[in-house]
Image (cartoon, rainbow, N blue to C red):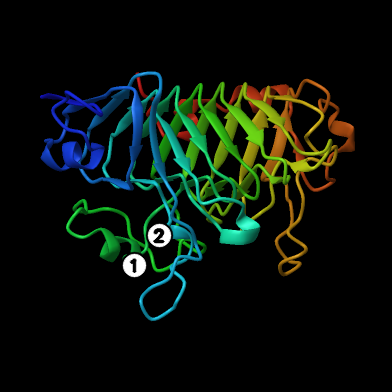
Amino acid sequence: MIYTIAPVGGDFTSLQAAIDAAAPGDALRVKAGTYAERVVVHKDGLRILAEDGAVLTGSGCAKDTWPDGREKGTFLSATLLVLGEGVTVENLTVRNDAGDGREVGQAVAVYAAGDRGAWKNCRFIAHQDTLFCGPVMQKVLDEVVPRITEGVECVPSVGDCPPTRARQYFENCFIQGDVDFIFGPYRCWFEGCTLHMNARGGWYTAANTPEDQPWGLVFHRCRLTGECEAGAGKLGRPWRAYARTLFLACDMDEHVSPAGFEDWQNWDGVRAVTERCGEWGTTGVRGDLSTRHPGARRLTDGEAAGITPEIVLEGWRPK
């Protein structure tokens, strides 16, 4: 079945209403327009196919509060939460308009929790913590009932989760933010994407890959740009001790720090950059690996050749 979502004249005016009505495997065609709603994709195999100019926007943030005054935190702030497996999203812009993290805290645009998520030609725009790729906590599921997916991966803490096989693939996407704006424990491949740092500066990534998991965030032929001062964008910092983040054949402009990765010394002093973080074939203004953090790995040609989407994503790659 194919449904059309449009501000006027479609089957639905709300993307959430269309998802609720759809069956697994259906296609949702999203016409140009701005859809101000927070959306949960709780069906497997859905294809969300957007036109140019289709924008999903929300303004949830970590400092939103429950009736008793407690803050909701990062993981209840997402504009788009995907719980279903095998979900494809194309050409959609997803924003979190809550604002600067120094005022509102973390504010997630996309929370990719299902396995085998495929994202092509999308735009994710926010400030702190734009894109999270990882499992859900019980409080997140409790918030979205009855829109839950049977068997969805649930953990007590997304910071210290067990090894996961869940995978996400991003191709030709534009991802904008500042502090730790691509983060999480999942196995993710980013192909030909642009990572754009806001004026605040910060860290492009913050992985928390489990110790026994071989792959985390891998960026291939991506471009790193920014609006911050030159050198104010760091490649990443380890959210947990075994962060696994690689940049392969990526082009980096002057906004990237000459040191590349950075230890999270301002938190607890023990989350150090190790050889699980590394680069190969970097080009552009910041292509000189000799200035990088001494703990990060400079991959050999042979090592880099053995890192492919099929290896990182355990034999799966979307068509």
Number of the label disc, if any, that sits on residue 76: 2
Of 58 and 248, nearer the camera is 58
Amino acid marked by disc 1 = Lys
x, y (%) of residue 295? 80, 48
Question: Which residue is painted at 13% across and 28% down in the image?
Answer: 11
Tag 1 secondary structure: helix
Q: Are marks 1 and 2 in contact (CB under 8 Å)?
A: yes
Residue 241 seen from this side = no
Q: Residues within 10 Å of mark 1 (few under 14, many from 20)?
A: few
Question: Which residue is painted at 44% across and 77% down in the image?
Answer: 70
Asked which quadrant contains residue 227, the reply is: top right
Residue at the outermost bottom position: 68
x, y (%) of residue 214? 54, 44
Kindly report the distance in space between the C-alpha atoms of the residues bearing marks 1 and 2: 8 Å
Figure check: 182 above or below 169: below
Figure check: 74 above or below 23: below
Residue at the outermost front position: 8
Quadrant in which the N terminus appears: top left
x, y (%) of residue 158? 46, 61
